[in-house]
Amino acid sequence: MQHQVKDLSLKDAGKKKIEWASQRMYVLNELVRQYVNEQPFKGVRIGMSLHLEAKTAYLAMALKKLGAEVSITSSNPITAQDDVAAALTEYVDHVYAWRGETPEEYEFNHKRILELKPNLIIDDGADLSIMAIKNEMYYSIFGVSEETTTGVRRLKALEKEGILKFPAVAVNDAKGKYLYDNRFGSGQSVVDGLIRSTNSMMGGKEAVVVGYGWVGKGVAERLRGLGARVTVVEADPFKALEAYFDGYKVTNMEEAARYGDLFVTCTGNVKVITGKHMLNMKDGVFLSNAGHFDVEVDMAWLRENAKYLGEARPNVSSYMLPNGRRVYVLAEGRLVNLGAADGHPIEIMDLSFSLQLQSALYLSENRGKLQNRVYNVPEEVDKKVVETFLDLNGIKLEKLTEEQKEYLESWR
C-alpha cells in the first residue's frame, strides 16, 4: 500500500518544500544533467532508508530520473515529514514512512522495502542493511552506500564477524563528507533544533557538548559563536587535548552535570547521560541528542523513574525527577536536528547526497567485482563532488606547477 493522503494541501506543502530544496542543490542537479542521457540506473531497484525530508526526497527523485526504481522509508521513527512523504508519492515508486511510527511500524516499513528485492541500498544508520542480513533478504543486493558514523561502525562490525553479505561504501568516512556534513552541517542544524524547540537564548548558557568528534566540534563551535559557555566531555585523551587547545573547558560528565544548562550528546555511544547524572542536574535543564540512536541519554531510566508531565512545547517533553527537579528532553532523545528542525542545511546535503549518488554509481559500475567488505569512497569520487561544488560557486583553485609537484615528491 502506498502512503495514503486525504488532505491535498498536505501534498502541496510537501511539493513546495521539495521545490525549494531542489533549486539550491546545484551539485546534484549538475550530476543529473551529466548522467541523465546514459540512464545509468536503468533496471536497478534502489531501496532507501534516510531521514525523509525535502533534501532526501530530491535525492530519491534524482535517482529516479537516472532510471532507477526507487523505494524509500525513513531511517528514524520521528524524522519523516508527512507533507514531504505525501508529495514524493507522485515522483518515485514506493513511499513507506510517516512521522511518529511505532517500533513495529518502523520495522514493518523497512521490511516492505526489502520485499521489493532492492539491488542497491542507500542507508542511514544501517538498519535496512542489517535487517536484510538478519531476515536473509539480501540475495538481490549487490551494494550498500552508508551515510552515517553509526552505520559505518555497525557495517564494519558485521565485516569483522564475517557476516557482511554485500560490499558497502562508507560514505560517512569520505574526506569531504565528515568535514562539511558532520562538522558544518551538524553544527548549524543541531543548534537550529535547540533554538526552534526551546525558543531560548544560547548566549549566556552553560552548554555541555558530550563527545568531540567532528559532530561535537561543529556543535561546540556554533554554540560558542552564539555566546554560550561551552564545556566538552570526552573519554578520548587526544580529543580532550584538542578541545582544551581549542579553548573549551574539558571535564567529565559527573562534574559537568552539576552546572550545565543544556546538554548535547554527540558520541554514538550508549548511556553517556545516565540517571545518576540527571539527579545531579539543575532544575529545568535541556537534554538533547545529536547521535543516530536514542540511547545516549538514558531514556529508559527516565521513563521508569521520572514522572512524565507531558509536552511543554512541540518537541519538548517534560519529566519530574524523584528529587522534584524537572528535565526537558528535546525530540524524545532522538536526533534533535531532524526531530525538532529540518536537518542539515540544503548546501550541505547537496554535497552529501551527491556523494551518495556517485557512490551508488560506483557500486553499480563495479557489480560483481567487489568483496563483501566496507570500502572507502574512492578519492576521485570524493574529489569530484567537492570540485563540482567549488566550480559551480565560482571558486577558483590555485594550480601547482610541474616544478612544484616534483618538489613535493622529491626527498631533496
Image (spheres, grey):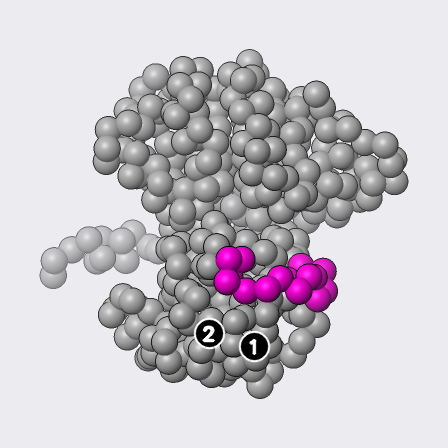
Residue type at numbered disc 2:
Leu
Q: Is residue 27 above or below residue 158?
A: below
- Please give the residue where the numbered disc 1 appears in the rendered image: 325
Q: Is residue 379 above or below residue 4?
A: below
x%, y% of residue 48? 55, 31
Of residue 125 and residue 21, the one placed in the foreground of this image is 125
Give the magenta-colored segment's residue range: 302-317
Q: Which residue is mark 2?
A: 279
Q: SS at mark 1?
A: loop
Q: Position of residue 407 (x, y in %)?
A: 21, 58
Q: Nearer the viewer, residue 279 or 71?
A: 279
Q: Residue at x 44, y 81 (%)?
A: 258
Image position of 388 (left or right of 4): left
Query: Could you tell which of marks 2 and 1 lies nearer the N-terminus?
Result: 2
Q: Residue furthest left?
A: 412
Q: Residue at x 65, y 30 (%)?
A: 96
* Residue 187 visible in the current orientation: no
Q: Are marks 2 and 1 in contact (CB under 8 Å)?
A: yes
* Amino acid found under the numbered disc labelled 1: Arg
Q: Name the residue: 47% across, 83% down.
A: 259
Q: CA distance from mark 2 to mark 1?
A: 8 Å
Q: Dot 2 lies on which element?
A: helix
Task: Looking at the picture, tell me which residue is in the foreground, 268 or 247.
Answer: 268
Residue 342's disc is none
Question: Which part of the image, by quadrant, shows the N terminus?
Answer: top right
Q: Position of residue 220 (x, y in %)?
A: 47, 72
